[in-house]
Amino acid sequence: MSDEKKSCSDSPANEPVVTRSSAPMWIIVVTLLIIFVAGYYFDQHSGWFNPKIYHPYATAEQLDTYQPKSGEAAALARGKQVYEAVCGICHGTDGMGKPGQAPQLAGSDVVNAKGFNRLAHVPLLGLTGPIQVAGKEWNLSMAAMGAALPDDDLAAVLTYIRTSWGNKQSAVTGDDIKKIRAGLKSNQPMTHEQLMQIPE
Amino acid sequence: MKTGTGIFWAAFAAIGLSWCGLVLTPQLQLGGAKLEPVLNSADTYPLQPTGAATLGLQVYRANGCAACHTEQVRQGGVACEISLTGLGIYKPADFTAYMKSLFGLKDLADLTNSITGNLKDWNGELPKTLLTCTDKALADDMSSRLKAVGVKSETHIVATGLDIARGWGDRQSVAADYLYDQPVQLGSLRAGPDLANIGVRMPDANWQMLHLYAPKSVAQNSTMPPFRFLFEVRKIGSTPSPDALNLPAGFAPAAGYEVVPKPEAKELVAYLLGLKANAPLYEAPFTPATAVKK
């Protein structure tokens, strides 16, 4: 015991104490570099926590470019969507019309014309006054319901009308509607006579 | 304990940050998930499961199906496929020659292999897949070139990856697929195939019943254990049950007996048939096969 007491290591002056020393510079530099690279990777690949973005897509812009657009089936589906939102309320989702609101589109002469020029004028300008549809007399007025629709949507809706409920006519494209829209001479609702003067 | 306060705050920060990352962030990301519109259609996704299917999820859970089956399809990438639908003024041979004349162009060099491969031995039948490439800009460039010379084409978006190639789905699984599942049965081990899309792949309720009662009766090399306790083997009464399974020889019970599914089996099958993760969504776009004219 006495020997130990005398030893140097036991003296209070030699107790180990905690001291602070600065971290080596290279660790700070490497850590900052890792943070920078990780941040860059996150920015490029994460979609910034957007719940709609999954691998293999990295950004919302990239995901937008891959949305399927082409195809007649896609246009028809879009046409059905727009028809049910805009036209179907009066003309019926089955195209059979509603008494006192709007005549039927299934089997209508204007719808089933060879060309779509005359039909396209109806939603673009509106229609008013007496008209015969499928042997019944109607005397109502329709506003220019399609004037505010984009070309592609109006084309899709006309295509849907011309190919549904037993109607079997050709499809309409957005470019066709653009041309017809550019050729409009007035913005007033047509009467039946005026409508019939428009070429098919 | 001079450092007690410091330890407290350090522990608080560690637990608090984990809570933010594991609970708060996912809640902010997906907590408000709602029904989603299906692309190019007026429908919404997913459909509300039937009552039997909702109960079936609990049967699925109770029998540990998720121990061997996952419900998550992974997607490796996405590709654009240009399909010819009309050649305009061209005859097939002329068109092939025209495509060859384009290969000199620098920006189309990457497409050369895909196009020559696809047009080889082509008898002029339409629609015809012209090329498959991963770069949407390149595909758009090509389709506008085709449009300029009067050739009609459609661009289809196709999901790619191992799971897709196995036929387990048309696209990857996304959060919307699990909107009505409580609890979600993601699974992590694939001793059996993925079931995210089983209702589309195997829509036959009778097949599902046979498969649950005796997996080897419909899939010879199946390693799935039979779930016979979901069925009742009983003596045929005055008339056979309309629900009785039509089992092949070797699996059928003794003469005069029939195998009838218990309610659990019916619920489980209703749940399996309801697993249809096949709607194209904004976050997982693809061109559905119904829109592709074959």
Image (cartoon, coloured by chain):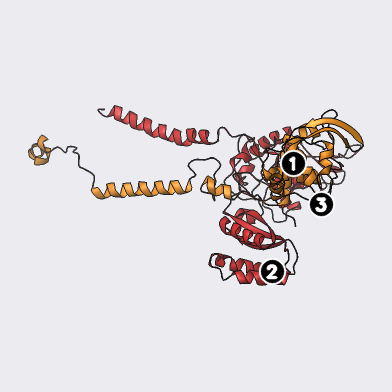
Chain colours: A orange, B red
Q: Distance between the residues labelled 1 and 3?
A: 46 Å
CB atoms at circles 3 and 2 under 8 Å apart?
no
Q: Mark 2 lies on which chain?
A: B
Same chain for the residues under marks 3 and 2 in the image: yes
Look at label 3 and name its amino acid: Pro
Say above or below: B110 vs B268: below
CB atoms at circles 1 and 3 under 8 Å apart?
no
Q: Name the residue under label 2.
A: B95
Q: Name the residue under label 3.
A: B248
Hey, which quadrant is residue B36 in on the image?
top right
Give the mark count. Answer: 3
Look at label 1 and name its amino acid: Lys
Q: From where the camera sits, is residue B121 visible?
A: no
The residue at 52%/33% (across/down) is B27
Hey, which quadrant is residue B114 in on the image?
bottom right
Q: Name the residue under label 1.
A: A80
Look at label 2 and name its amino acid: Phe
The residue at 56%/71% (across/down) is B104
Q: From where the camera sits, is residue B2 visible?
A: yes
- Mark 3: which secondary structure? loop
- Count residues near mark 3 (Cα–Cα under 10 Å), then give few for <14, some for 14-19, many for 20+: few
- Mark 2: which secondary structure? helix
Q: Where is residue A88 in the image (x, y as percent from the top left)?
A: 77, 35
Q: Which chain carries label 1?
A: A
Say above or below: B160 vs B58: below
- Camera-side residue of B30 and B125: B125
The residue at 27%/29% (across/down) is B3
**Quadrant for the C terminus of chain B in the image:** bottom right
Q: Distance between the residues labelled 1 and 2?
A: 35 Å
